[in-house]
Image (cartoon, helix red, strand yellow):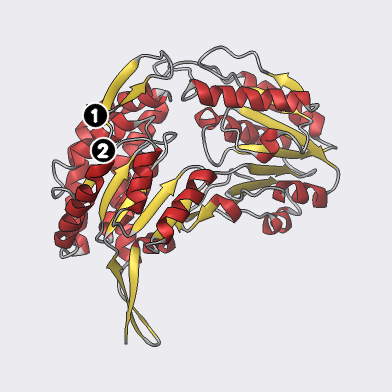
């Protein structure tokens, strides 16, 4: 009997549906079918591939509302955010495809012509927090570059991936995009199979395991491995604006976002004012289920993650942090917006990714101290700095792949530094990572 992957509604605990876990013994044949489809796909011109994609996404468009509701029920996020994600994926895919067309167009150099050729089969292992957008941003450049794709979505959100790909596959060539399901063992078997590239979004631990398993085949890797993003508020910052961004960057997607502002360092001269404003703003973020139009903070994906967030809050409190809002008494299945101050350097949330709706604040006296605190992490995905006179100077010293000045971090290409990334995606440079460079001279 095949093992079932069960998908539960985070708000109610109800079973939303099941999918069959892919048998590891079946993966070699799935890969073989992908190679067969890819040999035909790569013979098409880039424009012909884009036409296929355009027709496939148009086939999904009438189902946008259905997909949005399924995403909300399965992942927990409110219908407004789900609708934005679904419609962004459907309507934005052809735009990304045309970016890829520009990126992989042959170009002359001093020594000849650079061509961008297909790699073969790309395995995508995607997360649950943005269960459509995250894999789509990897799948589109892989396909338009002439590759076949095997997708393993998170076992937390298998239904939405299954449904969306089934709609695309009514148009796309058979076996060009296949979905497999399962827990880490299935992903590991995919990495070790006869594929040419792995694009992964997830934890550092899983990323390191993927690197080991991919080594024997010298497989291409593009991996985003999370973040613990710092935000520095300089003494001359616009405090109301910085406070607004601090809350938004900490609580968006219920804090389940890799570029959340997880460590906020505020100059002592404005710290009290900043904290009061942050607390007042965070109070206006109501919790609720996906179908509540006022919801701004929705249920945490599962109880294990919810308990991790609570343990981080408790750890910070035990080490001297003061609770300004929220705390460890939390109603299931939520984490209410929580604001902590005087978080110490040895607290877990200073060292690890909390991934929850927590605003974590500590003070500093000199800008050099703030930079040192911000860089004291093996993560380096995003960072931000708010202020006027020295923002460029500070931004240049932050060890992160993406730095926002008076705005949240996030950019294209989507790139991490240190242990937050290996390779990157998005933009012309990122799209080219899904192709083999060939120089003819």
Q: Pinpoint residue 118: horizontal percent, then vertical percent.
A: 27, 65
Residue at left offset 68%, top offset 42%: 231
Residue 21 seen in the current view? yes
Query: For this view, does 16 lie left or right of residue 410?
Result: left
Q: Quadrant of the C terminus?
A: bottom left
Residue at the disc numbered 1: 2
In the picture, residue 160 is in which quadrant? top left
Q: Residue 204 at x, y = what percent?
A: 54, 46
Say left or right for 361 vs 122.
right
Q: How many marks?
A: 2
Residue at image x 64%, y 24%?
A: 311
Camera-side residue of 385 and 23: 23
Q: Quadrant of residue 4?
A: top left
Q: Residue 157: image x %, image y %?
A: 36, 30
Assess disc 2: are there few (<14), some (14-19) or many (≥20) residues with their C-alpha within 10 Å of its C-alpha. some
Q: Secondary structure at mark 1?
A: loop
Label 1, label 2: how far apart the Cα atoms are: 8 Å
Viewed as shown, does residue 425 lie left or right of 68? Answer: right
Q: Which mark is residue 149?
A: none
Quarter of the view holding residue 5:
top left
Query: Could you tell which of marks 1 and 2 lies nearer the N-terminus?
Result: 1
Position of residue 432 in the picture relative to residue 315 (left or right): left
**Mark 2 and mark 1 in contact (Cβ < 8 Å)?**
yes
Q: Residue at x 76, y 53 (%)?
A: 389
| Label 2 sits on residue | 23
Q: Is residue 281 visible?
A: no
How many residues crowd mark 1 within 10 Å: few (<14), some (14–19), many (20+)?
few
Asked which secondary structure carries label 2, the reply is loop
Q: Residue at x 68, y 40 (%)?
A: 351
């Amino acid at each position: 009997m095949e093992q079932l992957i069960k998908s539960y509604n985070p708000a109610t605990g109800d079973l939303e549906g099941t999918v069959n876990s892919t048998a590891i013994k079946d993966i070699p044949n799935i890969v073989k079918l992908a190679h067969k489809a890819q040999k035909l796909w790569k013979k098409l011109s880039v424009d012909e591939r884009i036409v296929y994609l355009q027709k496939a996404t148009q086939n999904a468009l009438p189902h946008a509302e259905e997909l949005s509701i399924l995403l909300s029920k399965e992942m927990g996020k409110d219908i407004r955010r789900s609708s934005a994600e679904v419609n962004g994926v459907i309507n934005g895919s052809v735009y990304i495809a045309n970016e890829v067309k520009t990126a992989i167009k042959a170009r002359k150099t001093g020594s000849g012509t650079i061509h961008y050729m297909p790699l073969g089969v790309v395995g995508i292992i995607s997360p649950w927090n943005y269960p459509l957008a995250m894999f789509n941003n990897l799948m589109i450049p892989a396909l338009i570059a002439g590759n076949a794709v095997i997708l393993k979505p998170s076992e937390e959100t298998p239904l939405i991936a299954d449904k969306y790909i089934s709609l695309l596959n009514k148009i796309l060539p058979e076996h060009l995009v296949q979905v497999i399901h399962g827990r880490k063992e299935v992903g590991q078997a995919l990495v070790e199979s006869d594929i040419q590239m792995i694009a992964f979004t997830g934890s550092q631990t899983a990323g390191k395991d993927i690197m080991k398993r991919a080594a024997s085949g010298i497989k291409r890797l593009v991996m985003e491995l999370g973040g613990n993003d710092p935000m520095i508020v300089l003494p001359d910052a616009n405090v109301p604006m910085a406070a607004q961004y601090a809350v938004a960057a900490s609580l968006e997607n219920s804090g389940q976002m890799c570029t959340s502002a997880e460590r906020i360092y505020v100059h002592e001269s404005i710290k009290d004012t900043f904290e009061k404003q942050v607390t007042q703003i965070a109070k206006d973020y109501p919790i609720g289920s996906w179908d509540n139009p006022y919801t701004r903070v929705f249920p945490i994906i599962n109880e294990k993650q919810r308990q991790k967030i609570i343990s981080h809050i408790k750890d910070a409190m035990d080490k001297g942090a003061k609770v300004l809002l929220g705390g460890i008494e939390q109603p299931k299945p939520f984490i209410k917006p929580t604001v902590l101050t005087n978080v110490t350097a040895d607290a877990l949330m200073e060292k690890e990714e909390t991934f929850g709706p927590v605003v974590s604040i500590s003070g500093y006296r000199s800008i050099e101290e703030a930079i040192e605190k911000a860089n004291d992490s093996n993560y380096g995905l995003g960072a931000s700095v708010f202020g006027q006179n020295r923002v460029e100077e500070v931004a240049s010293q932050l060890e992160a792949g993406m730095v926002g000045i008076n705005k949240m971090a996030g950019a294209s290409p989507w790139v991490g530094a240190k242990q937050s990334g290996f390779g990157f995606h998005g933009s012309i440079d990122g799209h080219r990572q899904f192709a083999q460079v060939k120089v003819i001279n």
